Image (tube, rainbow, N blue to C red):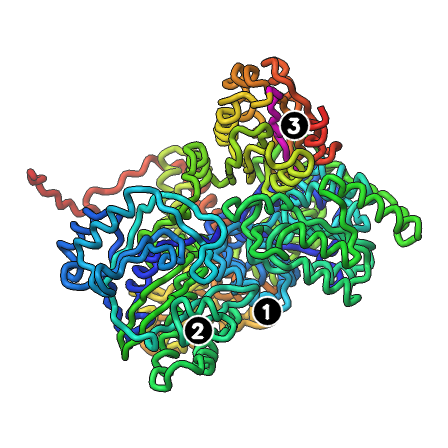
């Protein structure tokens, strides 16, 4: 996936790093710190004097919004704006000590939908910024269709989310627009509700913001709200996604940025992480998602498109409850890469028998390859069979193979012979059989 | 442009991806194309000028270039760029090609080009009316005409899937692997495809479904279309609009894959980077439903797609829209081929009689053929039949440089060696080994520097300044005793021949203006015989129509020296034979002719 969410802290750090380039006439104090627990915050206070001197705000920094409504923004002890360092430390320790439930949507102040429960592991702490509602503004940018969109509003915070259509000015930009054209469009579209005295500053900030969004390869960038006080800017809340395909040219610009998993998402299993690691080191593509490890049907499919149609077809014929995984290997993986991929799947697949005592099904599928050498990749699968044959027989696995492409006759012959030699059940088909028809055959048995 | 490619389409292949290029050439040979579909290869880091590939049982050479601009200049007819650069450089390569111009389509294979760059590249191409296929694609094919890189896989699969000749389906997919699969399905259930494009799996691709389908609507070979879409994005709705508005009238069969995605939250990425539904209408199901409602033929599932293809095809056939296809004759690529270790492009001894650049030796050897040694040189060195004035000039040069007495270093060496009792060939090469920058090299140097000055439009004064800065005396200027008043008659002879026979002598004319300046400083700084030869050779090649680049290459490869080597060998052999005839004893240099100045070595 090309677009990846980053922490609010990292988003602010990236903007701060390039502040003078994009916002030369504004100042931003960049007083913000990311900690995982109270003692880290204590330690940070040794360097960062403002943590001792100013009233603080603390909140989790874990890619989810609606933190205020979930009661997860600390800005008051007895009254708003009186949070001390020790209070922030104890609050963070309290919130990070037990799993928290978080709702992602609200109707007014009433949560709707289901909550997710997970540990809070990252918190951002900043100074409390006294300001008036009039000084709060909204700005965001992203790509919609072929155009970049800039959204601006004279009102920030929750107001803007609840009155989007009336309160937000949208401006579309073509990718080929020049800087002059962009600046002119933004100047012409400063929201009418921005105070006249602030219009020029707002436009200037928006131009810098949009330029930063483009040049720093953000896929999404939102500040809601930012506070504009003369030439002083405060970024109260930010959401950002990066286009990670640009990572190779943004190494310097982005610095050491992390792509965390969303709150409430299951941690990736060691197997998935191992495949991701192998994928990152290979010119080929290795992908694995585990959907339901106890399920009966496992797929080992070559090719991005083919992997989708196999998943579709299994859902059509068997329903998704029987589908254990989704993934692909493609782009001409080496024999050893294929072996590693196959062994990872076979290991997962042979950990337990089917609850209903049925045989498990392994679909080794694929379309007619353009350039992947089928015999070479199948050699890797055969080597995995050699190592897992006993376990496979113990669990009970029926193998269905369908593949075409360079050297496919040899590949199919080899895998059939290997399975026969090892005493594994196998059916083998080539391009004369419709690509997904082995799913039907497997399920009719 | 109703057709993306024809049988004459040629491509420039960026990156020397040998397997993919070989697959293209195997395809070309199989379908009996007149010319190979790859006209040039851009290989920025290669030092080679060409690479060998099989063309059927034989081998052909495809020229290599360092950059796209040179490749395009050499092969202007090649209007397809196959951009196989990595995701790091694919953008720059595409933008440069758009800047150079003259490309009608550009295919980009890299996956994961930064989105902003991909968008800019696609928008720029669209402005310039260039069709972009990809990024993140295996390409496309016009069966029986032109195939991009690895599309269709092996040649066996291509023939099995009837991709070697045009059928009647227009195929557009996102996925490259399924493109191949669908070609196969269509060949089994219908009569193959007329044109097919895999548009690519990245979120931002150049030509989208609608662009390709609108072109196919105009292509008379396409009788119906097959669209394989994917969950995510709204491109399929543009197709629906075109069908509803009547812009597309040909039947379309369509299916969006990724119907499973609805069961999972957005955490599971099914398939390509572009495949992620952000709204209900971007789901595969919604799109399949909307397409069916618009009158597009939508199967009940992907597994049912073959039946739907057969149904539409058979209906069109029954109506007479689709006729029978005559199966064309094909060449068969040999299974086993061996690459050749050596290449020869000048002579051939395989027939009845050996040839020089295609001419039997007997047709140039005897006097009645009217051919001289100049003709033989033009055939064997330049693979061209030079006109009479040029071959005569070459012969004049050879005769002029044949000897210059026993005292020059080469002749002296040859004589010393001969007196040591060595053979003719051994003595000859010791003489030849002295030929270089100081002996005979003035021919090369004169050609190089005078041409440089002329190319850069330096006035004689500027040229002299330039050489002063370089710190070298001007090669080809100066003689031990000769001057303007006491001219070198060999030079006069060459100049006279050139004046009477050359169509023009621009470089000599320039050199003479330089000579006026140098002789005004010192009498004997005349254009000497080496200089005249080097300069007139350049004028000869210019008159024969060689490009400046080719002439520079002649100079840098040492061709001018070669004339001196051949000519002077005659003289050296004369001196060697002279020594043998005189039976001169071993030579020892007199000690009183050597300055001995030997110090005791210091200890360090």
- What quarter of the picture does the C terminus of chain B occupy? top left
* Chain to which mark 2 belongs: A
Up/down of B83 relative to A54, above or below? above
Tag 1–tag 2 contact (CB < 8 Å) = no
Query: Relative to A100, is B183 on the left or the right?
Result: right
How many discs mark residues in the rendered view?
3
Label 1 sits on a secondary structure element that is: loop
B315 with respect to A15 (left or right): right
- In this rendering, does residue B52 appear at all? no
Depth order, front residue of A102/B473: A102
Q: Do labels 1 and 3 share a chain?
A: no
Mark 3 closeness class: few <14, some 14–19, many ≥20 residues within 10 Å = many
- Label 3, on which residue? A401
State which region is magenta: A357-368
Q: The residue marked by circle 1 belongs to what chain?
A: B
Return the mark for residue A152: 2
Residue linked to disc 1: B502
**Residue B13 drawn at (x, y percent):** 58, 52
Would you say A204 lies left or right of B566 here?
left
On the image, the x and y values in percent for residue B517 come to 37, 77
3 and 2 marks on the same chain = yes
Q: Residue lying farthest left?
A: B603
Where is residue A360? Give x, y as percent.
60, 24
Label 3 with label 2: CB-CB less than 8 Å: no
Determine the residue located farthest toward the right in the rendered image. B319
Seen at 25% across and 57% down, the residue is A125
Camera-nearest label, 1 or 2: 2
Q: Position of residue B194 (x, y in %)?
A: 78, 51
Q: Are marks 1 and 2 on the same chain?
A: no
Marks 1, 3: nearer the viewer: 3
């Amino acid at each position: 996936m090309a677009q990846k969410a980053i922490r609010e802290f990292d988003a602010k750090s990236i903007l701060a790093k390039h502040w003078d380039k994009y916002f030369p006439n504004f100042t931003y104090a960049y007083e913000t710190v990311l900690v995982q627990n109270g003692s880290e915050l204590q330690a940070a206070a040794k360097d960062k004097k403002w943590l001792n001197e100013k009233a603080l705000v603390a909140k989790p920094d874990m890619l989810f919004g609606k933190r205020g409504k979930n009661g997860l923004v600390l800005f008051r002890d007895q009254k708003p704006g009186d949070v001390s360092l020790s209070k922030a430390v104890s609050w963070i320790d309290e919130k990070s000590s037990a799993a928290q439930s978080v709702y992602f949507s609200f109707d007014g102040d009433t949560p709707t939908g289901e909550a997710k429960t997970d540990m809070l592991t990252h918190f951002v702490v900043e100074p409390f910024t006294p300001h008036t509602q009039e000084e709060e503004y909204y700005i965001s940018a992203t790509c919609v269709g072929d155009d970049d969109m800039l959204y601006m509003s004279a009102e920030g915070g929750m107001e803007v989310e609840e009155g989007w259509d009336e309160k937000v000015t949208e401006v579309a930009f073509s990718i080929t627009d020049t800087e002059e054209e962009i600046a002119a469009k933004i100047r012409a579209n400063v929201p009418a509700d921005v105070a006249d005295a602030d219009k020029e500053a707002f436009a200037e900030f928006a131009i810098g913001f949009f330029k930063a969004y483009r040049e720093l390869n953000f896929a999404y960038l939102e500040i809601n709200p930012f506070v504009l006080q003369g030439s002083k800017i405060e970024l109260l809340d930010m959401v950002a996604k990066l286009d990670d395909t640009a990572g190779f040219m943004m190494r310097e610009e982005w610095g050491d940025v992390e792509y965390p998993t969303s709150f409430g998402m299951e941690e990736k299993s060691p197997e998935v992480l191992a495949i991701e690691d192998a994928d990152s080191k290979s010119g080929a593509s290795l992908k694995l998602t585990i959907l339901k490890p106890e399920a009966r049907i496992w797929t080992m499919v070559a090719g991005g498109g083919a992997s989708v149609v196999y998943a579709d077809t299994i859902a059509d014929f068997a329903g998704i409850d029987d589908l254990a995984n989704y993934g692909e290997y493609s782009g001409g993986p080496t024999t050893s890469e294929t072996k590693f991929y196959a062994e990872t799947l076979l290991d997962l697949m042979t950990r337990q028998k089917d609850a209903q005592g049925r045989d498990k099904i392994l679909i080794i599928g694929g379309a007619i390859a353009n350039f992947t050498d089928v015999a070479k990749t199948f050699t890797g699968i055969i080597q995995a069979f050699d190592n897992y044959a006993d376990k496979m027989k113990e669990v009970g696995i029926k193998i269905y193979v369908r593949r075409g492409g360079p050297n496919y006759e040899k590949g199919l012959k080899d895998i059939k012979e290997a399975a026969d030699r090892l005493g594994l059940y196998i059916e083998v088909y080539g391009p004369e059989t419709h690509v997904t028809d082995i799913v039907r055959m497997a399920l009719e048995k | 442009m109703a057709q993306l490619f024809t049988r004459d389409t040629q491509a420039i292949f960026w990156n020397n991806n040998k397997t993919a290029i070989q697959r293209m050439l195997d395809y070309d040979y199989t379908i009996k194309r007149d010319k190979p579909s790859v006209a040039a290869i851009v290989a920025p880091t290669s030092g080679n000028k060409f690479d060998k590939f099989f063309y059927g049982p034989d081998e052909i050479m495809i020229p290599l270039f360092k950059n796209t601009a040179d490749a395009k200049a050499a092969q202007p007819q090649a209007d397809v760029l196959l951009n196989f650069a990595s995701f790091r450089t694919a953008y720059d390569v595409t933008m440069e090609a758009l800047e150079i111009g003259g490309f009608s389509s550009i295919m980009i294979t890299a996956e994961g080009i930064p989105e902003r760059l991909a968008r800019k590249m696609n928008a720029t191409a669209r402005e310039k009316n260039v069709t972009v296929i990809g990024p993140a694609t295996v390409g496309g094919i016009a069966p029986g005409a032109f195939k991009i890189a690895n599309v269709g896989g092996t040649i066996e699969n291509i023939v099995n899937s009837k991709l070697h000749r045009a059928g009647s389906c227009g195929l557009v997919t996102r996925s490259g692997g399924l493109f191949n699969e669908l070609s196969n399905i269509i060949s089994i259930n219908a009569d193959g495809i007329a044109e097919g494009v895999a548009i690519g799996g990245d979120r931002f691709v150049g030509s989208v479904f609608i662009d390709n389908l609108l072109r196919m609507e105009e292509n008379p070979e396409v009788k119906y279309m097959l669209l394989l879409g994917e969950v995510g994005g709204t491109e399929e709705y543009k197709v629906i609009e075109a069908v509803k508005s009547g812009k597309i009238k040909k039947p379309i069969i369509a299916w969006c894959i990724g119907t499973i995605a609805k069961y999972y939250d957005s955490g599971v990425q099914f398939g390509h980077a572009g495949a992620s539904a952000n709204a209900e209408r971007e789901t595969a199901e919604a799109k399949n439903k909307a397409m069916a409602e618009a009158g597009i033929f939508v199967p009940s599932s992907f597994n049912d797609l073959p039946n739907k293809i057969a149904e539409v095809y058979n209906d069109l056939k029954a109506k007479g829209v689709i006729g029978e296809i005559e199966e064309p004759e094909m060449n068969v690529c040999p299974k086993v081929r061996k690459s050749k270790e050596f290449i020869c492009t000048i002579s051939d001894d395989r027939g009845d009689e050996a040839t020089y650049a295609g001419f039997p030796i007997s047709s140039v050897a005897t006097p009645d053929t009217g051919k001289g040694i100049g003709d033989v040189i033009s055939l064997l060195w330049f693979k061209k039949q030079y006109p009479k004035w040029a071959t005569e000039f070459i012969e004049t040069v050879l005769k002029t440089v044949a000897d210059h007495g026993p005292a020059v270093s080469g002749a002296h060496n040859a004589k010393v060696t001969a007196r040591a009792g060595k053979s003719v060939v051994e003595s000859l090469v010791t003489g030849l080994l002295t030929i270089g920058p100081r002996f005979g090299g003035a021919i090369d140097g004169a050609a190089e520097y005078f041409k440089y000055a002329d190319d850069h439009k330096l006035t004689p004064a500027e040229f002299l300044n330039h050489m002063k800065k370089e710190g070298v005396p001007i090669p080809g200027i100066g003689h031990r005793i000769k001057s303007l008043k006491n001219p070198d008659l060999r030079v006069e002879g060459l100049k006279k021949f050139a004046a009477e026979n050359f169509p023009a002598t621009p470089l000599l004319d320039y050199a003479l203006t330089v000579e006026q300046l140098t002789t005004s400083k010192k009498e004997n700084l005349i254009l000497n015989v080496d200089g005249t030869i080097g300069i007139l050779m350049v004028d000869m090649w210019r008159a024969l129509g060689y490009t400046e680049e080719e002439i520079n290459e002649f100079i840098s490869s040492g061709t001018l020296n070669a004339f001196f080597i051949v000519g002077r060998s005659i003289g050296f052999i004369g001196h060697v034979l002279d020594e043998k005839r005189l039976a001169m004893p071993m030579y020892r240099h007199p000690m009183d002719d050597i300055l001995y100045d030997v110090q005791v070595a210091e200890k360090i």
